[in-house]
Amino acid sequence: MNGRITDIHFTAGASVKAGTPLVQLFDAPEQGDLATSRPSSGWRRYRWNRAKQLAERQFGPQATVDNAQAAFDQASAGIAKTEAIISQKLVRAPFDGELGVRQGRGWTISERRARKIVSLTDLSALYANFTP
């Protein structure tokens, strides 16, 4: 996932639980897509329900119902896709642990050049061997 970091939700040295938000990436375009998709989906749901009502009373063909349902399903799938992209832009802790010191100078994340933002150590699974 590529993106510009817009917010940092952690402090160095803090203990975090799995799922705790750490970093928010820029998601304004996706939020805008979602804001425009929801009303369209509502309208398509209305048209589908109306087509079903008319078909039940035999005032409209089943093809109209099928087309309206397909349009509503497509709009719903678009919303689900946009919500999934938005959820990926909030980086969360993958497991319980202790955060290290915040790293890096640039505030972007790129799939091509991995950058370490912060280390997360699970101290419950940390082992050390000492030899005399």
Image (spheres, grey):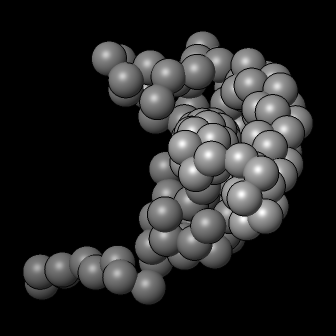
The relative height of residue 72 versus residue 29 in the rendered view (above or below) is: below
Q: Quick one: 132 or 56, which is closer to the camera?
A: 56
Q: Is residue 42 above or below residue 27?
A: below
Q: How far from the left and from the top, in percent, is residue 68? A: 65, 42
Q: Quadrant of the C terminus?
A: bottom left
Viewer-nearest residue: 104 or 19:
19
Extreme residue toward the front, this view:
58
| Drawn side of residue 69 relative to residue 28, left or right | left
Q: Nearer the viewer, residue 126 or 78?
A: 78
Give x and y (percent) for residue 126. 35, 78
In depth, the one of 118 and 101 nearer the eye is: 118
Report the residue at 78% width, 64% height from top: 57
Q: How many marks?
A: 0
Query: Which residue sits at x=55%, y=44%?
Result: 63
Give residue 13's quadrant in the image: bottom right
Relative to 30, 100 lies left or right? left
Q: Position of residue 122 (x, y in %)?
A: 45, 73
Res 37 quadrant in image: top right
Q: Is residue 106 at all visible to an observer of this figure?
A: yes
Q: Residue at x 71, y 47 (%)?
A: 60
Residue at (61, 67) in percent of width and height = 19
